[in-house]
Image (cartoon, grey):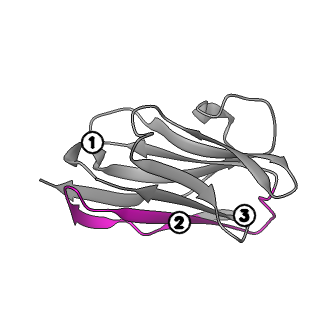
Amino acid sequence: QVQLVESGGGLVQAGDSLRLSCKGIGRSFTSDTMAWFRQAPGKEREFVGATRWKSGSFYNVNVAGSVLDRFTVARGGNRNVLNLGMNDLRPEDTAIYYCAARPKGDNEDDRMGDYVYWGQGTQVTVSS
């Protein structure tokens, strides 16, 4: 069974750091685009960042402008793993964070409808 499993969420204070991980199971995700989205209470799901396979072990990285100065997205040593590093967290970062994946292609990274696989989500809560 193909799955994306997120881990690493939790309750933190403003200014703290947190790292989320997503592991793809059941097939190789090496050449897939893997991404993070988040959905805050009462808001639409939004793009956070993605890695798109380029060649060999190289991936292009795309991070949303709103978090570019605080968040990093990267594949793990295991290419089926996608990590999200979050620094200087703020209460407005509170959301459910979702991992997503789609086969390689030229689609824009932030197009949610193009993603085939989704994780169950992990809650991140930032207290002020």
Say what amino acid the circle numbered 1 marks: Pro
In the drawing, what numbered circle is on residue 118?
Answer: none
Label 3: how many residues lie within 10 Å, few (<14), some (14-19) or many (20+)? Answer: few
Q: Using the image as rendered, state which of residue 57 and residue 5 is in the foreground.
A: 57
Circle 2: element type: strand
Specify whether residue 8 is painted magenta: yes
- Can you see residue 100? yes
Of the two numbered discs 2 and 1 on the same chain, state the one appearing first in sequence: 2
The residue drawn where x is 55% and y is 61% is 83
What span is in magenta? 5-30
Give how far apart the Cα atoms at labels 3 and 2 are.
17 Å
**Image location of residue 36, percent across then percent down:** 53, 48
**How far from the left and from the top, in percent, is residue 3?**
66, 64
Residue 23 sits in quarter: bottom right
Task: Using a 10 Å C-alpha cutoff, classify the residue at mark 2 as few (fewer than 14 neighbours), some (14 to 19) or many (20 or more).
Answer: many
The answer to whether marks 1 and 3 mark residues whose Cβ atoms lie closer than 8 Å is no
Q: Secondary structure at mark 1?
A: loop
Residue 48 shown left or right of residue 29 in the figure: left
